[in-house]
Image (spheres, grey):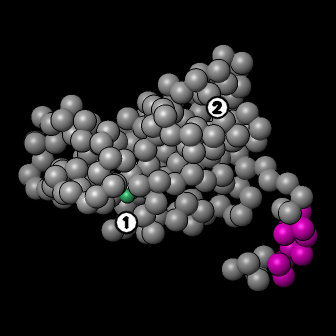
Amino acid sequence: MFERIRKSDPEFFPRLSRQQRPKYLWIGCADSRVPANEIVGLLPGELFVHRNVSNLVIHTDMNCLSVMQYAIAILQIKHIIVCGHYGCGGIKASIKRYELGLIDNWLYGVGALRQKHQAVIAAETDEAAQTDVLCEINVIEQVHNVCNTSIVQQAWRRGQNLEVHGLIYGIHDGRLHDLAVTVGSGPTR
Ligand code: CO
């Protein structure tokens, strides 16, 4: 793929090496089947990416917060995409009460989310469907968390154009769904 780019646009990589100007920050799951750039069809240089297990935005996670701060304040990205995926292993572990080790601590918040929404989850017939509904709830919760960070709040207060989107990807069909929970200000896209 990169060989093709080199041939059609010999200046592409030299130009990229000088600076990046992505418009999007992607916060997605670390799952190997959910590759950020490929899912949205964006080239190197177009997507700033942070990934962790179950695409969580936790207010004490310096890694995620630093990525957000740099992306918003320095790179001036216009959109934050929180992207979950159906059948997420971290979410499934919470539904099935698996004990997997250290990762259980990382996923602690997912358990709290499961309890908070247990009526909606219990209405689903099987564990796969319960997992998928919690996958969606989790994305919406993380969009909420992104919006409530001091970084995003300050950006909006400064009048910076910044939208936060919640998407979910189907590993089983390769489709990307917009959960229609976009929050933000300014001219779109
Ligand atoms: Co996952």
| Residue 8 in view (yes/no) | yes
Q: Position of residue 130 (x, y in %)?
A: 18, 50
Q: Is residue 23 magenta?
A: no
The quarter of the picture where the C terminus appears is top right
Label 2 sits on what residue type? Leu
The quarter of the picture where the N terminus appears is bottom right
Q: Which residue occupies the extreme front position in the image?
A: 102
Q: Name which quarter of the figure residue 88 lies in.
A: bottom left
Left/right of residue 98 with respect to residue 175 in the rendered view: left
Residue at x 59%, y 33% (from the top left corner) = 163
Depth check, front residue: 63 or 6: 63
Quadrant position of ligand 1 = bottom left
Q: Name which quarter of the figure residue 161 lies in.
A: top right
| SS type, badge 2 | strand
Q: Is residue 84 above or below residue 61?
A: below
Q: Position of residue 81 (x, y in %)?
A: 54, 45
Residue at x 62%, y 28% (from the top left corner) = 151
First to last magenta residue range: 6-15
| Residue 180 in view (yes/no) | no
Q: Earlier in the sequence, mark 2 or mark 1?
A: 2
Residue at x 71%, y 19% (from the top left corner) = 159
Label 1 sits on what residue type? Ile
Residue that numbered label 1 is attached to: 171
Residue at x 16%, y 52% (from the top left corner) = 97
Q: Which mark is residue 162?
A: 2
Q: Name which quarter of the figure residue 85 lies in.
A: bottom left
Left/right of residue 136 with respect to residue 56 in the rendered view: left
Q: Is residue 101 above or below residue 179?
A: below
State how many labels appear.
2
